[in-house]
Image: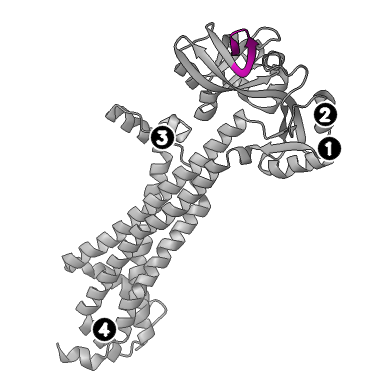
Amino acid sequence: MSTGPFLEWRLAARYLRAQTDNRFLSFISLVGAVGVALGVAVLLIVLAVMNGFESELKSRILSMASHATLSGLDAPLEDWSGLATRVAAEPHVLAVAPYVEQRALLAHGDRVSGVLVRGVTAEAEAKVSGVAAHVVAGRLADLLPGGYQVLLGRALAAELRVATGDTVVLAVPMGTTTPVGVVPRVRRLKVAGIIDSGFYEFDRNVALVELGDAARIFRLGTSVTGLRLKLDEPFAAGRIVRAVAVDLGGGFTISDWTRQHANFFRSIATTKSIMFVLLLLVIGVAAFNIVATLVMLVREKQSDIAILRTLGLAPRSLLAVFVMQGTAIGVIGTLAGLGLGLLVAAKLTTLVHGLEALLGTRLIDARVYFIDELPARVSALDAARISATALGLTVLSTLYPALKAARTQPAEALRHE
């Protein structure tokens, strides 16, 4: 029997179309293709959300935080002006800004909240972070020396129930000795503006005051807590700040934005790996449906297979016929899943907002997820990996029924006809 260059494919296509005569087989084939499509789509959407969340988190952190910090080991930096000049001259350092940072309490009426008070100079801070662009009421430049004004994050302002122009009381842990004992030192600050970065951790915990005012409040004199650095390679911040500290002779505490938020990104990477494995089970179930479809098809087409073998069709050609048929179901399901996944990922934010409006609730709470929306970012590498895995499982699912068909003995099959 002459096989011809495309005989196997023509037979596979004929059997695939012929299943419409058997509604049960057609239904099982459809279930297999839909299962693969849903598995691919859900996996693509979940990974796109995780990628979008990670990318958005990095973007918001980098817009508010300095890339790296350099501070004293056990004491504040005294000759920080000369040190800042030396640091600014280091390779990869674009800008340097001094800062003062201490924990304290803010109170307004009967509302009290723990905060991280950060003293900055408006001009220098604007060079190392994007906080100025996120001040929605007032300006960063309103933090003038001696003004004892404060910028609060939106979530912190809501917690304290204050607005621009209100007065809050700052209580610092460094007590003042009085005849009645040690009492906390307090200072009244005027709310000069509100910061809305979209990053809940910052908006809820940080209060900005002018550098000199913060130094006087915390009794640092002319010293500062450390220096904030902006670098030309943010994702190499750890390596660069270590090199800077070594060049300066050591004796500093160093940190960078990846170390400060390491738990966020570690948890995202772990979740992505777990979700990839779990959602592969959906594709695995669909692959078992393909196995069932082909096994039943092989049993139904026993006489056809026997006749083809009698006419000289080689076992390997029969193997190829059923592998192609199962692979075709997998390819159709994979392509449909990719299309559905890309469509949903592109419209995900709109869909979530519509669902929130329909249910009358907020699904993405910044207090839990650190951001207030659900971004999606499809990675070409993830799409390729998902497609390859789905097709690989599909091809593997065809091997048993295909081998069963290839091993069919013509005489044995025709005996029961």
Q: Is residue 10 visible?
A: no
Most foreground residue, 325 or 100: 100
Packing grade of label 1 (10 A; few <14, some 14-19, many >=20) is some
Q: CA distance from mark 3 to mark 1?
A: 47 Å
In the picture shown, does residue 32 fall above or below 211? Answer: below
Amino acid type at mark 1: Leu
Which tag, 2 or 1, sits closer to the chain's start? 2
Q: Secondary structure at mark 3?
A: helix
Which quadrant holds the C terminus?
bottom left
Residue positioned 84% across, 31% down in the render = 86
- Residue range in magenta is 172-182
State left or right for residue 93 relative to residue 21. right
Q: Quadrant of residue 241?
A: top right
Q: Which residue is mark 3?
A: 349
107 left or right, relative to 403: right
Instruction: Report the number of discs.
Output: 4
Reading the image, the residue beneath label 4 is 305
Give the amino acid at mark 3. Answer: Thr
Frontmost residue, 400 versus 107: 107
Residue 299 location (% of width, % of height): 21, 79
Quadrant holding the N terminus: bottom left
> In the rendered structure, which disc, 4 or 1, sits on the residue that comes first in sequence?
1
Q: Nearer the viewer, mark 2 or mark 3?
A: 2
Give the colour scheme of this rendering: one colour
Identify the residue under disc 1. 248
Distance Cα–Cα, label 3 vs label 4: 52 Å
Task: Report if residue 175 lies within the magenta region.
Answer: yes
